[in-house]
Every structure is written in C-alpha cells, then in structure tokens.
Amino acid sequence: MADKIAIVGCGLVGRAWAIVFARAGHAVALHDPVAGALDNALALIEATLPELERNDLLRGSTAAEVREHLAAVGDLEAALAEAVHVQESAPENPEVKRALWAELDRLAPSAAVIASSTSAIPASAFTESLGHRGRCLVAHPINPPHLVPLVELVPAPWTDADVVARTRALMAAVGQAPITLNREIDGFVANRMQVALMQEAYRLVEEGICGVGDVDTAIAEGIGLRWSFIGPFEVGDLNAPDGIADYCRRFSDMFYEIARTQTEARRQSPETIAEFERQRRALLAADQLGERSRWRDRRLMELAVWKTKVARGDLE
C-alpha cells in the first residue's frame, strides 16, 4: 500500500478527496470532529464506489479494495500519524482554519505537507504564524474532485518550492490535473474565470437580453462543449489559420469593445435574485434539485469515462 494520506474534514469535498487517494492505493485516514460525520462519510463513500467501479473510474481497483484503504479515525493526532500529506477540508472560515492549522502544524509529522481545499482563502491568511509554515499551501479542487481532476496549487509567500513540487507530483500520481500559481490572488484561477462568466450571465438576464434558460443553453450546448477538452488559449490557437497571434490580431479590437461594457461589478439585488429563482423554478421544481444534482454527477462520470478513454487512446 502507498503512503498514508490524512483527510481532515469529511464533508462533500473531503469525502471525494478520500476516494481520489484511496483508489490510487494510498492508506487514507479520515478525521472529522463533528459527531456522526465519519460514519456518514464512510456510508456515502460506500454508496458511491460501486457506480465508480462499473464505470471503470477506480483505476483498476474494485469498490471493496478501495474501501479497504479507508479508515475513520476519531483522534486527530492518530489520524495524522505517519501521514505524508494532509488534506484539510474544513469550513471556509479564516478563524476556524487558524485554530485548526495550529493543531495540524503541531501534530503532523515534520515531513508532511499540509494542504487546504479552500476555494477562496489564501494560505497566507491562516499559516503566517505557524512554526513550519514552509510546508503549507492551498490545493484547491473543483468539486467533486473524484470526477473533476483540476487542482489549483497556490503557495503562500513562504511556501517551500520543494513542497509545491512534491504536491504537484502527488496530485499527478493520483490522477488529478494540477496547475501551479506563481503567487496568491483572490479566487485563484478557476473561480476568477467562473466569476467573470457568472457575472456576465447574471448581467444578460438582469438587463433583459435573454432568459436564464437561454444563457444556460448558450454554455451547455455551445462554448461549454469545446471547453470540456480545450481551454481559451487553445480555442484561439485553433480558431485562426495561423494560430493564437493571428487570432488576437483578428479579434482583439472586438474583444476590447465588448470588455468595455463588462467592467461594472454588480451585486445582485433581492429583486434580481427573486427573478433568477422564478425562472429557474419554472424550469426545475425545488423538490427536483436533489435528483438533478445526482443527474449532473452521472453526466460528469460519463464525461470522465470518455476523457479517460481518449487519454488512453481507446478512442480516436
């Protein structure tokens, strides 16, 4: 069995991380201080594993084999013992993280990397005073990480370069797709791009250009299709005869003029939010949200299967 990984915080993200590491053969210790959280986490993981096995998303292992790699550990020190990597997925609250990370830094083996799943809080906000802060960084996944492989590695100003390199190597080895930021920035990379898109989506509906459903269709049946396997720079590179420079020369003026109309940051008013809700509930009743979420995860699973087959050369 490969090196031990400790998962601290076993909500939706922590559970998915446990699957990521366990299916790669790591011994995974799960810890959560909330009463009943560990039993709930293991039950939900056990319910998920068979479908992942049926879709060949357990890296050749069976559900039973992956389950054997998982252990619920009620004591934090015991969960951290001998771990080479600690993945923290606690609530998005700087004060909570400061207190927790003081314990993680005190109890984790000196050689262990400590990474946070935070989606918006830079590591510098809760690691500055730690005695071993050089081993701390953000490793932000896109939820759920067992189906969406991107991991954003965001070092604090004091994070050791070797820690970033080790974490990137680990994430690649367990089947994730790591990217490394050179410095901290609010929202990191994925959320900054997502916020830009969401703000424009909201603006289009708010200004009466089109409805909620049409905006979603523009992404799901339009640019989202090609974004599922190539990013914006490759889109540009392939959308002009002579590549990205040619694309920029052709379209940069148009992009500039459009961007000038998109620079106003807005908070949505209660009335606007109510209109979003009205339009969405006309398309999907509130009591169907859970089933639609499960539908989304099944579609993500199917996409992950397809991308895995393409990467292996099984499909042309």
Image: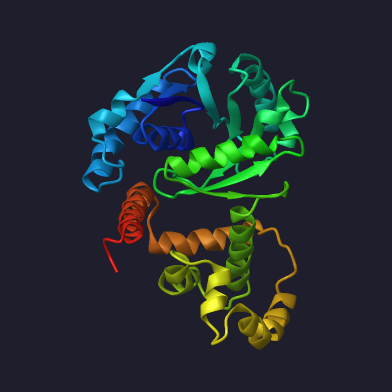
- The answer to whether any part of residue 117 appears in the image is no
Relative to the observer, which residue lies in front, 192 or 168? 168
Q: Is residue 165 left or right of residue 79?
A: right
Q: On the rendered image, what quadrant is the N terminus found in? A: top left
User: Colour mode?
Assistant: rainbow
**Residue 33 percent coordinates (x, y):** 51, 18
**Residue 68 percent coordinates (x, y):** 29, 24
Q: Is residue 68 above or below residue 211?
A: above
Relative to the observer, which residue lies in front, 230 or 45? 230
Q: Is residue 261 left or right of residue 195?
A: right
Q: Is residue 190 left or right of residue 215?
A: right
Q: Is residue 277 left or right of residue 19?
A: right
Q: Is residue 52 above or below residue 276?
A: above
What residue is at 59 percent from the left and 33 percent from the top?
115
What residue is at 49 percent from the left and 61 percent from the top?
278
What residue is at 66 percent from the left and 15 percent from the top?
106
**Residue 44 percent coordinates (x, y):** 33, 32
Q: On the rendered image, what quadrant is the C terminus found in? A: bottom left
- The answer to whether any part of residue 72 appears in the image is yes
Give the image quarter of residue 242. Answer: bottom right
**Residue 145 percent coordinates (x, y):** 45, 44
Q: Is residue 103 above or below residue 234?
A: above
Among all residues in the image, which is located at the extreme left? 54
